[in-house]
Amino acid sequence: MKNKFISAYQEQKNYVEKCLKEIAEKHTLKAIATLGMESMNYSLLACGKRIRPILCLQSADLYHISNEAILPYASALEMIHTYSLIHDDLPAMDDDDLRRGKPTNHKVYGEAIAILAGDGLLNLAYEIMLNDLLHGYTDGKLKAVHYIAKAAGIHGMVAGQVLDLQMENQRCDADLLKKIHRNKTGELLKASILAGVLVGGASEEDCYYWEQYADHLGLVFQITDDMLDVIGNVELMGKNTGMDSKKNTYPQLFGLEKSVELAKCNANSALCCLEKIEKDTYFFEELINQLLERER
C-alpha cells in the first residue's frame, strides 16, 4: 500500500509540476511587468510538496473527473498557497529567509516586488478558475470556486494568520490553538479536497464526511509540522527550523510526547471518516500514515 501511494503521489506531483510550468510560460509571454512575473515564477516553480493540488486531483478522480478537467482548480490552489508563503515569509510577518530550499522571495526581489508577486498569484488563481467556469459552467464548479475563496480569505487562512500574529509572544489555550491551525492551514487543505469532490457532484453525505476527514487531516499536518520545527532537518525540509519560538505550537503547549498522541488521535478520527465514504480511499488513508512518519 505504501509503495502504491508513493508511486501515485509522485506521478501526480510530476503532472502538477509540468502543468504549473506550462501555465507560467503561457502567462510570462503575455506579461507586461516581466520582473513581477519572474518573481511569481520563482516561488511558484520552486520544488514544493504540491499536496494541495494533488489532493484536488485525487478527490476529483474518485468522482470520475479527469486531471485535465480539474486542473484549473488544482493549479489555483497551489498559486494561493504559494502567495500565502511569500507573504508569510516577509519581515512584517515571519521574517524568514529560506523556503523550499531557496532564499525567500523578498530576499531575492525585495519586499515590494514580493508583495506584488503574492498579489499576482492570488489574482491569477481566480482568473484561471473563472475562465474555466465561463467556458463550461456547472453548479459544482461554482461551488468549488466559492469554497476555495472562503477558505483562503478572512473566514479561513487569512483569519488564521491574523490570530497567529495577534498571539505572538502570548500563551493561548488548546481551543484557540486548534482554531488558529484549522484556519491557517486546515481550511485550504479542506478546500483542496472539496473542490474535487464538488466538481465531481458528490452527495451531501459524502461532502460532510470529506469535510470531517479534512479537518482532522489539517490538524495532523499542522501538529507534525510544529514538531518538525523542533526536531526537523533543515536540508530535508528546505526551510529553517526553530522559527516558531514566538508562536503558539503544539510542542510548546503540550510537549512532544503529547503532540504525538494528539496527531495519532486525529489520524484515527480521519480514518474513521473515510470508512463512511463508499469509494476507494486508499490514497487518503495512506496520506495520513505518511504524515505521521514525516521525515525528520
Image (cartoon, helix red, strand yellow):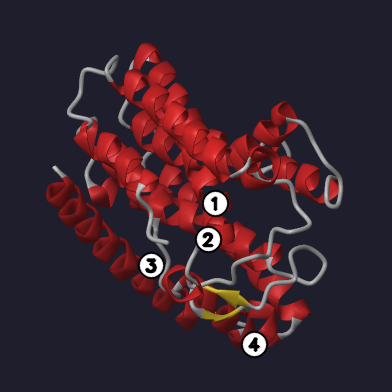
Judge whether 221 appears above or below 33 on screen: above
Marks 2 and 1, how far apart in space? 6 Å
Sort mark 3 into few (<14), some (14-19) or many (20+) by Cα contacts within 10 Å: many
Relative image position of residue 146 (x, y in whole percent): 56, 34
The residue singled out by tag 4 in the image is 108
Q: Nearer the viewer, residue 220 or 146?
A: 220
Q: Where is residue 45? Give x, y as percent.
A: 44, 74
Q: On the image, numbered disc 3 is attached to which residue? A: 20
On the rendered image, what quadrant is the N terminus found in? top left
Compared to 161, does 11 lie above or below? below
Confirm whether residue 202 shows in the render.
no
Question: Which amino acid is tagged 1?
Answer: Met
The part of the image, by quadrant, that contains residue 148 is top right
* Disc 3 element: helix
Single out the mark in the foreground, 2 or 4. 2
**Which residue position is annotated with label 2?**
231
> Which of pointers 3 and 2 indicates the residue nearer the eye?
2
Q: Bin the neighbour count of mark 1 within 10 Å (Cα to Cα): few under 14, some 14-19, many 20 and up.
A: many
**Nearer the viewer's eye, disc 1 or disc 3?**
1
Residue 234 rendering spot, x and y as whole percentages: 50, 73
Q: Earlier in the sequence, mark 3 or mark 2?
A: 3
Q: Residue at x 73, y 48 (%)?
A: 161
Q: Which mark is residue 227?
A: 1
